[in-house]
Image (cartoon, rainbow, N blue to C red):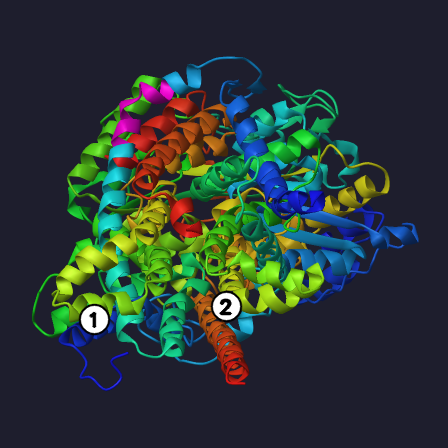
């Protein structure tokens, strides 16, 4: 009997070890470094100072950056949530064969295996000043000047995010939707409930976990991104992480670390807010 | 220097007579791998691998392949970006052997003590290295000291010194490698008039069709050149501006951004190529291989000669501290090979110069030497390192000869004292 | 199911939405496919000049295009190792989480934290940690761990969903009937969770294969493919990048065909078994 009680610990041990080595320990070190002092041309000076945090929190630029990042987050979240929900709904409730549903689902994942960088660059031949879209519109006489905001604008950034991250919303929603007992839905329909009512009152609540998790993925990915913004806005928008990136370029670890901690804290707060609405663990383990 | 002289020189210069075969076959020898493997080294040097880490513009796999072939031990290339290099060097100094860093990066890594100074007596051709690096002079004249001029960081007191020494010693911070002087790139077909001043970068005429690089340490220098040329701001030292000067410069960039002046800020070399090739911009900061790349796509682009001068930059090969014994010997072998000509010939076609130009000549045809170094009209087609045609016979290289170019350097890429402030302001520019 | 019923109108609306989404996903990819056949002098944008297979050759020729072959040779084993480790560790942990045990909540929330940890931050953290311990960062050590910290929470969440359908009573029953633990695992647990395992593998592989921020500072002296691609964009970029995209997509379709085939096969076998 005793050995049986030990089993969960043995089963969970590898996970715990990995998370300790590659999450907890590194995070603790980032935290330590964030209170160090950096001297340009000298390097790290062990200290205990909140100077880095202070300089971050008192710099108006950072608020601007967070605001612009939050703006992207909210827009992308809304778009991916709507898209993710309806695509998952289509795959689960409208595609009759499970194999076909999985097949279609995988079709959505294939582009994911091509490097994100290549996928971002791939918009350029389409959207540029002399790109396919502008050329087509000009040739057909719809416009006579190329539309410039198609590339290097907030629009392009959102487009890329949606392109890159919608999958992260589809997967968890698909997953929780697939677990809904279809007879439940049919029963509701048979009882005379309208399709919308069924979706709103039955399906959405049952997908809460999926929507919640998907939102956490998307929020995290957008908030911590610096690459998509830099490339797709043509450097015309900043991101929270771009500051971290610049600091690393001159070995200012303490400020980069402090910046990271602030970012992490904000992401954790948002994620915790989302996860308060859904108790992932309870939902998942029943 | 004639080929005969080159041959003569090569005979006396090195215990390996690296150029013997090469000089005999002259310019045709490029890439032919005619250099014999060194024989005086112990057999076990064959098991050594030298890792060369640097940025993509000079850390090119073909160089490693040629070096491995010529030297008899393995040279491998790891490519990263500026940030990646400095982080790998300081956090994991043993993961690389030779760091191909920019001049300004030495200011960040030398104090960390992760590199050993290069023993000048072990660099066979030290005397032939361009005085831009070794003496701070060029063609008999002082080279600009605004920014991180190579001479300022060139020497250290001793092998393990963690600071620079003012003036020559027996220990070099790194062995000078490739360098160039950059300027603005334009599309002459779309602009239709000569561009002669940095001020044109801010000219409202090019609103929505201008770009500047999004790498703060370098972008700020382009901005400073333009600010001063346009008469918006004067600087005490353009290479080391004060907070007020940086602030005013970036405020101007922001003002232009709000007016829709910048089509984009480019983050990578490739983006600058595409911006130009795709007709997005007609005037922008540019690096010379990007000009070559746009040209090889059949688009006309000019690397303009501006009256205020050019922005110089340079790289060098630093030896990591952990190297010793046979491995250190191998690293020195590699450093010497680097200056022996093949590399210089190869990198010239990318538009860069090597610190010992005269050996490069043996690996370039007369046509190529005249075009890249002499500032003369091409007598035949000019190709990129990959063999694409970049210039036709009769064309001249923008910016003139090697001499003209380096006599014109006004500022150097640098890591300024106010770098922290600069980065924070630059972030503001991005987010404005 | 409504096998014989007419499809509701929403089917057509959503089918259109889905089609549009797929076009959105593949649209730019298609211009990549076309442009990967760009001739030797062609650029990264239209028009297509002198089309051919030039850049496919350049891709594995290790020329100026970067060391794609070498980087792929590291990324593939890395992604496969991450995949296997993710499956084993998350199945084990998933089984453990069916019971409450001491520290289970802490572990669970740590896993969630791992999910929301910005990749760049983790990259710095692991680099500093390895430096602190005096260990060299390598793609097969530090980057492997960095990837696991990202794939494991995904695997765990999928396993939660799958295992909630596995009644512990099945195992108990098998165990009570005299099956060894190993037999119970291989003959009772594995068949039930197999589709979940395939999903976890797919995720583990995909996430690792394309991971950039977590690899950036942890990969050591030898680049993984996404890092190599990134550095390729810092130099003369050629349509070789597009050729790479095309090759990846073709390989992906083959892999997916394989995965689908195996799921179909398993379902088929299971259905046959049930009918006895």
Marks 2/1: CA distance? 26 Å
In the image, C6 versus C252, the foreground residue is C6
Residue B398 in the image: state x and y as whole percent.
40, 52
Q: Is residue B260 left or right of residue C34?
A: left
**Up/down of A236 relative to B29, above or below:** above
Mark sitting on residue B61: none
Say yes or no: labels 2 and 1 on the same chain. yes
Callout 2: SS: helix
Chain letter of the residue beneath label 2 in the structure image: C
Q: Is residue A154 left or right of residue C40?
A: left
Q: Which residue is mark 1?
A: C14
Residue B41 in the image: state x and y as whole percent.
89, 50
**Up/down of A9 relative to A161, above or below:** above
Q: Which residues are magenta?
A: A55-65
Quadrant of the drawing holding the C terminus of chain C:
bottom right
Q: Residue at x 50, y 82 (%)?
A: C268
Q: Which residue is mark 2?
A: C195
Q: Residue at x 48, y 72 (%)?
A: C252
> Which comes before the other along the chain, label 2 or label 1?
1
Q: Is residue A190 left or right of residue C187?
A: left
Quadrant of the drawing holding the N terminus of chain C:
bottom left
Q: Is residue B407 left or right of residue A91?
A: right
Residue B30: tell me if it is visible.
Answer: no
Displayed quadrant of residue B390: bottom left
Q: Residue at x 85, y 48 (%)?
A: B15
Residue A143: tell me if it is visible.
Answer: yes
Callout 1: SS: helix
């Amino acid at each position: 009997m005793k050995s049986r009680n030990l089993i969960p610990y043995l089963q969970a041990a590898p996970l715990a070890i990995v998370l300790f080595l590659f999450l907890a320990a590194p995070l603790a070190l980032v935290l330590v470094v964030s209170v160090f002092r950096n001297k340009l041309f000298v390097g790290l000076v062990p200290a205990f100072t909140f100077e880095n945090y202070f300089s971050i929190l008192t710099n108006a630029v950072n608020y601007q950056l967070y605001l612009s990042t939050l703006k992207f987050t909210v827009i992308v979240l809304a778009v991916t949530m709507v898209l993710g929900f309806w695509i998952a709904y289509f795959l689960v409730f409208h595609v009759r064969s499970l194999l076909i549903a999985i097949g279609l689902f995988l079709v959505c994942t294939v582009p994911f295996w091509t490097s994100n960088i290549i996928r971002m660059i791939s918009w350029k031949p389409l959207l540029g000043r002399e790109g396919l879209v502008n050329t087509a519109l000009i040739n057909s006489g719809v416009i006579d000047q190329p539309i410039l905001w198609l590339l290097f604008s907030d629009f392009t950034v959102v487009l890329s995010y949606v392109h890159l991250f919608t999958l992260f919303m589809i997967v968890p929603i698909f997953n929780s939707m697939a677990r809904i007992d279809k007879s439940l839905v049919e029963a509701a329909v048979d009882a005379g409930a309208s399709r919308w009512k069924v979706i709103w009152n039955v399906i959405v609540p049952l997908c809460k976990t999926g929507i919640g998790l998907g939102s956490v993925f998307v929020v995290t990915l957008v908030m911590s991104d610096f690459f998509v913004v830099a490339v797709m806005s043509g450097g015309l928008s900043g991101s929270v992480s771009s500051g971290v990136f610049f600091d690393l370029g001159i070995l200012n670890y303490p400020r980069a670390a402090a910046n990271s901690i602030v970012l992490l804290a904000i992401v954790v707060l948002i994620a915790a807010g989302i996860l308060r609405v859904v108790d992932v663990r309870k939902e998942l383990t029943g | 220097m004639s080929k005969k002289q080159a041959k003569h020189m090569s005979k006396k210069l090195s215990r390996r007579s690296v150029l013997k075969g090469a000089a005999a076959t002259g310019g045709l020898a490029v890439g032919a791998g005619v250099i014999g493997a060194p024989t005086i080294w112990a057999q076990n040097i064959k098991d050594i691998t030298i890792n060369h880490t640097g940025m993509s513009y000079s850390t090119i796999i073909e160089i490693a392949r040629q070096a491995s072939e010529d030297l008899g031990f393995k040279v491998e290339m790891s490519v990263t970006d500026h940030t990646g290099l400095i982080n790998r060097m300081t956090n994991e100094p043993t993961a690389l052997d030779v760091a191909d860093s920019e001049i300004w990066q030495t200011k960040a890594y030398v104090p960390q003590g992760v590199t050993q100074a290069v023993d000048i007596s072990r660099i066979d051709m030290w005397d032939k290295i361009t005085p831009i690096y070794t003496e701070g002079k060029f063609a008999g004249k002082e080279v600009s000291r605004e920014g991180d001029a190579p001479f300022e960081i060139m020497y250290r007191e001793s092998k393990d010194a963690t600071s620079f020494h003012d003036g020559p010693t027996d220990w070099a911070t790194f062995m000078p490698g490739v360098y160039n002087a950059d300027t603005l790139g334009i599309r002459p077909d779309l602009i239709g008039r000569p561009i002669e001043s940095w001020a044109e970068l801010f000219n409202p005429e090019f609103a929505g069709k201008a770009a500047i690089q999004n790498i703060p340490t370098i972008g700020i220098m382009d901005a400073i050149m333009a600010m001063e040329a346009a008469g918006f701001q004067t600087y005490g030292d353009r290479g080391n501006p004060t907070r007020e000067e940086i602030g005013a410069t970036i405020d101007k960039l922001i003002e232009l951004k709000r007016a829709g002046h910048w089509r984009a800020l480019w983050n990578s070399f490739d983006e600058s190529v595409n911006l130009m090739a795709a007709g997005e911009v007609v005037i922008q900061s540019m690096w010379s291989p990007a000009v070559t790349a746009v040209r090889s796509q059949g688009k006309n682009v000019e690397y303009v000669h501006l009256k205020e001068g050019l922005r110089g930059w340079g790289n060098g090969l630093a030896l990591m501290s952990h190297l010793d014994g046979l491995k250190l010997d191998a690293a020195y072998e590699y450093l010497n090979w680097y200056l022996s000509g093949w590399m210089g010939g190869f990198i010239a076609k990318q538009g860069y110069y090597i610190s010992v130009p005269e050996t490069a000549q043996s690996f370039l045809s007369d046509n190529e030497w005249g075009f890249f170094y002499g500032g003369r009209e091409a007598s035949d087609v000019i190709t990129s390192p990959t063999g694409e045609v970049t210039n036709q016979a009769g064309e001249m290289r923008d910016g003139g000869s090697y001499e003209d170019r380096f006599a014109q350097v006004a500022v150097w890429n640098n890591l300024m004292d106010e770098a922290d402030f600069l980065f924070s302001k630059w972030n503001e520019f991005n987010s404005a | 199911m409504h096998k014989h019923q007419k499809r509701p109108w929403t089917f057509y609306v959503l089918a259109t939405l889905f089609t549009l989404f797929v076009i959105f996903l593949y649209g730019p990819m298609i211009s990549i496919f076309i442009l990967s056949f760009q001739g030797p002098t062609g650029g990264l944008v239209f028009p297509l000049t002198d089309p051919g297979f030039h850049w496919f050759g350049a891709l594995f020729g290790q020329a100026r295009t970067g060391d794609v072959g070498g980087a792929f040779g590291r990324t593939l084993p890395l992604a496969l190792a991450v995949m296997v480790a993710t499956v084993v560790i998350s199945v084990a942990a998933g089984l453990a989480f069916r019971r409450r045990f001491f520290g289970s909540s802490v572990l669970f929330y740590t896993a969630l934290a791992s999910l929301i940890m910005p990749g760049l931050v983790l990259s710095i953290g692991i680099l500093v940690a390895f430096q602190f311990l005096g260990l060299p960062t390598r793609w097969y050590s530090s980057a492997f761990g960095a990837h696991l910290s990202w794939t494991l929470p995904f695997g765990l969440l999928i396993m939660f969903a799958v295992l909630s359908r596995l009644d512990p009573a099945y195992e108990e029953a098998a165990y009570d009937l005299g099956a060894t633990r190993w037999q119970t695992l291989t003959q009772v647990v594995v068949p039930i969770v197999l589709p979940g395992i395939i999903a976890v593998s797919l995720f583990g592989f995909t996430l690792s294969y394309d991971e950039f921020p977590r690899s950036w500072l942890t990969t050591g002296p030898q680049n993984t493919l996404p890092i190599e691609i990134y550095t390729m964009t810092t130099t003369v970029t050629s349509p070789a990048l597009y050729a790479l995209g095309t090759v990846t997509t073709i390989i992906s379709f083959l892999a997916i065909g394989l995965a689908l085939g195996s799921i179909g096969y398993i379902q088929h076998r299971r259905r046959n078994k049930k009918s006895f």
